[in-house]
Image (tube, grey):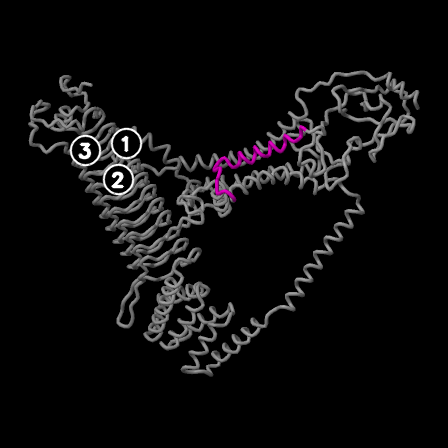
Amino acid sequence: MAQQIMNAQNSIVPAPRIRSVTLACRRLVAWSLEVGLVAMSAAVPWGLGQYVLSTQTVTLTPMEKTAEEVTRAIPTARLNTPLNTPVPVNPLVQQAQQEWARITQLPPHRLHRTVPRLTNILWTAALIAPIAVAGGQFIQLNYTGCTWPKRWLGLRVFSMAGESLQLHQALSRELMRWGLPVVIVGGLTLATEFSLGVWAPAAVGLLAMVEGVSAIAPDKRAWHDRIANTYVTSVAKVPMGYLPIHKGYKDGIVPSRNGALWSQEDSTAVQLYGETDHDDEWWLTEAEGNLTSMVLVPRASLIHQPRGPLVLRSPASSRWSWWLITSGMVLACAAGFGIGRVTRSPGPQTGDDIFLETAQKLANQSLSGDDYSAAILMLAQTDDPRAAHYLTDLLSQSSQPEALATIQQALISQGLDSLPFLLALSRVLESDLQQSLDDDTRHIRLEQRHVVQDAIAKLLIIHNGNLDGTRLDRVNLGRYHDADRAFQLIQPGLLAAGTSWQGANLNQANLAGASFFDVGADGKPDTYDDIISNLSQSQLIAVSLERANLQGAQLDHVDLRRANLSDANLVYGNLENAQLTNAQLIHVNAAQSHWQGSNLVGADLTQAIFNGADLSHARLNRIDASHSQWIKAILPQSDWIGANLMGADFRQTQLTHANFQGANLDSTNFTGADLRQANLRDTDLRRATLTGVNLTDADLSGAIFDDGRTVHDSFITPNAQLNATNHLRGVNFSRVRNLDGRQLNYICAQGGVHPTCPKELTPKD
């Protein structure tokens, strides 16, 4: 055998190791490609959906269909397809938005609720695609030991036994690899209330990279490989005609499977490996080796590892461990069940007996008068979840005022647990009252409805401030009055943050000073845990909401005609397609709110704040908005016919295609505003500031720039008596339409820019 070893050593031919990059670099590149594939599978459809959302526009209706405008409108019209129809976001997308908001501290008002259909599809794909890609990579890793990037770069993952990966090894490897960074970032966010925002995924990736750097250890194994008892090696092809031999044979010492060392004299076989631990690779030619047989031992046997908890145990030991764990869990469950049976209190059983006995007596009508009322009140005191439902059914079958009052008292004592049943009964009664009923039946239904409404109102008073998550959808708490009964919801100062009133009727309710918003657990507004309310599609005609806090509230498609919202907080609120004709919005704060398509005709917006608000396509005809603020607001295609905007601030506002015909714009500040193709016919622009305004194709027919007392009728006649206020100085009127001589005379005298202005009137810097 010694002679064979010597012959093998003599036949060893040193071959240069040809590697473009080291093993560590290839592992880093493979990791980057794996992460990149998952990230791109989500980023591409999400980005496309965001692009569709950002480019969605409504077909413009130009004031005058010039060829240029029609050409410009054609691409817009093409966007109006079924795929661009606004739809509610997919529940999966909605849940993902909420989780993303929690991670990045995004406030609820920044989450999308309605998006184009195509965006909805793409965003749903953005959630499914990364799961599919990551799942495919995991399946490949489990069955083949390499993902697509690892295969491209010639890498493979083995167990320490030199075998393919087991499922638990692949799971523990990936959970350690990605779970630890996620736990660290999430734990720090929860513990310190400090959020990395949109950089949270980058932080997770950076921590995963740092964990991967642990592979620089002498044994080339990262922490996740140690946990999973795996290692990564190169699977580069061996040159034809050559077999690798471990260099330890040159010293005559070979490690055995159990970690002991044995010499050449102890064996008649030669151990071969595909990669050595040193920089040089030695190859044994088949022709010169003079070997008749070889035993190929797994390379893992060369790695000396201390026996510890991370080393795989023998199959017998593993079976005993699993048997002990399973038996312990079964015994623990049995013990818990037995203790529960032994220590169970007889209270619930007694309560159940009382409930059944009392319900039987009430059903048999064996009680009357005071006994009947006492039985109902006793039924309400039983700790039984069926009590509220039974009492509600009993109310729907009762007609006597005394019985109805007693049942109402019993339901109120049940607390908010009775609210869902009261709401269900309320909807049934409303449906019945829409039908054709005889007088007696209608009288009974009206009395029952009155009792239900009064019970709901009292529950709101009793549980004021603890209504988060309460759903009052489609409830009818509107005011009514007839000969026998009257009802009006009077809840000033109601604390109703987190409530839902979708489709509710709150007509003429008094909710002055009510709060439908709360800052949440962190005590900071405009963060992810803000508690907002939903009043979408509700009826709020003539409701009193003075000083109400409706920050971030969902008020789309609501009916707020003649409502009083003076001094209310509507910051970040959503009032798309709302009806607010003749509403009172004096000194309201509606910054960064959404009013697209809303109707505010005749509303009073004196000193209101709409900075950064979006009122695209809104109708604001005949409003009184004197001294209001609209800085950087989005107001394209909005209507302001006959509006009073005296002293209003429209700095840097988008007003393309806006219609201001006949509006009072005296002393209005339009500095930096975009008034392209705006209709300014017959407007009062006296003392209006137009510095930096874009008036391209704006119609100024009949617009008033001065009081007419100092300007002669002659065309461009300089007049020394002109009051040069310079409020038009430098304003470009070159592309304005329908200017007459009087207007040009004043514009030129005030320093405006127009091709017909004489040079001597051109302003000098």
- Residue 38: x and y in percent read 57, 35
Q: Is residue 686 above or below residue 596?
A: above
Check residue 629 in the rendering and tell me which mark sits there, or answer none: 2
Counting residues from the start of the chain, the first of labels 1 and 2 encountered is 2
Q: Residues within 10 Å of mark 1 (few under 14, many from 20)?
A: many
Amino acid type at circle 3 is: Ala
The residue that mark 3 highlights is 688
- Residue 196: x and y in percent read 49, 37
What is the magenta range?
A: 191-216
Q: Residue at x 82, y 24 (%)?
A: 248
Amino acid type at circle 1 is: Asp
Query: How far apart, in angstroms, are the residues tagged by discs 1 and 2?
Result: 16 Å
403 lies left or right of 311: left
- Residue 199: x and y in percent read 50, 35
Residue 742 visible in the displayed image = yes
Q: Residues within 10 Å of mark 3 (few under 14, many from 20)?
A: many
The residue that mark 1 highlights is 674
Q: In the rendered image, which quarter contains the N terminus?
A: top right
Counting residues from the start of the chain, the first of labels 3 and 2 encountered is 2
Secondary element type, mark 3: loop
Q: Residue at x 89, y 21 (%)?
A: 5
703 lies left or right of 189: left
- Asked if the stretch drawn in magenta spans residue 210, the answer is yes
Q: Residue at x 14, y 20 (%)?
A: 761
Q: Quadrant of residue 267?
A: top right
Check residue 260 in the rendering and tell me which mark sits there, or answer none: none
Query: How far apart, in angstroms, are the residues tagged by discs 1 and 3?
Result: 15 Å
Q: Is residue 443 above or below residue 574?
A: below
CB within 8 Å, label 1 to label 3: no
